[in-house]
Amino acid sequence: GQGPATDADTQAAIERGIAEGRSGDLDGARRTFRDIVNRNPNAGAAWVNLGVLAERTGDLKEAEASYRRAAQCTPAPPESWDFLARLLVRTKRASEAEALVRGAAQQQPTDLGARNALTWVLLETGRLPEAEAEAKKILKADEQNVRAMQLLAGLEGTGRLVGLEGGG
């Protein structure tokens, strides 16, 4: 067998898998990402890509399992929380999505990926003042956080004056 994968090996394999997926070779991409996680179970980007491939082929159960696994990696790829939250909201499980990302954000306050996903869920469920407050907390921690800026811009794009509408 091969020795342990280095970060450089893993990154090169991830790029190869992405290229296979983009060229339409979904089976090849899936094999590449499976091989990566078999050698390096903490390769969050490979788990995210397995989730994306599963979602593209309609296997939402597998997609969810892959996104959940990505979110458990150290560090978790920030997008793992977004993809998981979006899948849960899309499958009519918004309250589960909120509880999951809120719990992750509380456990790991420095994990801005989970906090951004929470902001997105709040925005999607129409809780604009809470979404705005969460986005501002993220920007206080990281004033260059592009995702939080996008979410705040989305709030402003709702045409509502955040903070003036009623609750609920």
Image (tube, grey):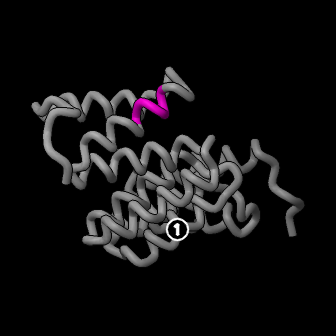
Q: Nearer the viewer, residue 108 or 113?
A: 108
Count of numbered circles in the view: 1
What residue is at 52 percent from the left and 45 percent from the top? 113
**41 and 79: which is toward the camera:** 79
Viewed as shown, does residue 126 lie left or right of 104? left
- What is the residue that sits farthest to the top in this orientation? 143
Q: Element type at marker 1? A: helix
x, y percent for residue 69: 59, 66
User: Which amino acid is tagged 1?
Assistant: Ser
Image coordinates of residue 59 in percent, x first then y, are 37, 76
| Residue stretch rendered in magenta on the structure | 135-139
Quarter of the image for the N terminus: give it. Answer: bottom right
Work out whether residue 114 can be spotted: yes
| Residue at the spot 75% in from the left edge and 42% down from the top edge | 8
In the image, residue 87 lies at what x, y percent? 35, 64
Q: In the visual, does 98 lie left or right of 32?
A: left
Q: Which residue is mark 1?
A: 66
Front one among 109 and 46: 109
Q: Which part of the image, by quadrant, shows the C terminus? A: bottom left
Residue at point 54%, 51% (across, down)? 105
Image coords of residue 16 (percent x, y): 58, 49
Magenta region includes residue 137: yes
Counting other residues with Cα less than 10 Å from the Cα at mark 1, is it few (<14), some (14-19), or many (20 or more)? many
User: Chief secondary structure of the magenta span?
Assistant: helix
